[in-house]
Image (cartoon, rainbow, N blue to C red):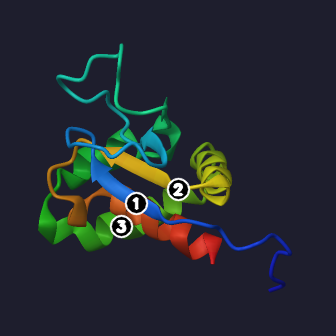
Amino acid sequence: MARSSRPEPRSAVRVERVYGEHDGSGHHVLVDRLWPRGVAKAGAPFEEWCKDAAPSADLRKWYGHDPDRFGEFARRYRAELGRDPAREAVRHLMELAHDGSVVLLTATKDLEISGAKVLAERLRRALR
């Protein structure tokens, strides 16, 4: 597989909770399918909402953030990321990452077993 002639990205893809404090660096993108509870649309702590990059409603409901299901969830979610409309959303996020730092925001409590983590890994791999 030929490597792109595009230069390596200048910065990282990070994952943070939407409810946390943000230092303002990077382009903040909400990557949850549902709007986070308690977050007002006016003055939201992100520049855009990319819900097409989030796991499907069916997958999210099946997973239920059960740590025992994370491996299978990640496998299924990676498959979803390869199909439209998620594939187009991933392309958009990769473009943002090439232009600067991207912060994927999620309302999920445990980032280590979140869809945002799976998405960040996908982006990092694709940007190498």
- Label 2: which secondary element: loop
Q: Residue under circle 3?
A: 74
Say which residue appears at 24% left-offset and 23% top-offset: 39
Give the x, y percent position of residue 114.
27, 58
Q: Secondary structure at mark 3?
A: helix
Q: Amino acid at mark 1?
A: Arg
CB under 8 Å between discs 1 and 2: yes
Confirm or deny contact between disc 2 and disc 3 (CB under 8 A). no
> Which image quadrant: the N terminus?
bottom right
From the image, tell me which residue sits under label 1. 14
How many other residues sit within 10 Å of disc 2, few (<14), some (14-19) or many (≥20)? some
Along the viewing direction, whichever of 38 and 44 lies nearer the viewer: 44
Estimate the spatial distance between the alpha carbons at disc 2 and disc 3, rounded to whole Å. Answer: 24 Å
Q: Which mark is residue 101?
A: 2
Cβ–Cβ under 8 Å for marks 1 and 3: no
Vertical placement of 93 versus 66: above or below? above
Of callouts 2 and 3, which one flags the residue occurring earlier in the amino acid sequence? 3
Residue pictured at 52% horizontal, 39% vertical: 52
Dot 1 alpha-carbon crowd within 10 angstroms: few under 14, some 14 to 19, many 20 or more: some
Marks 1 and 3, how far apart at CA? 18 Å
- Residue type, label 2: Ser
| In this rendering, the label closer to the viewer, 2 or 3 | 2
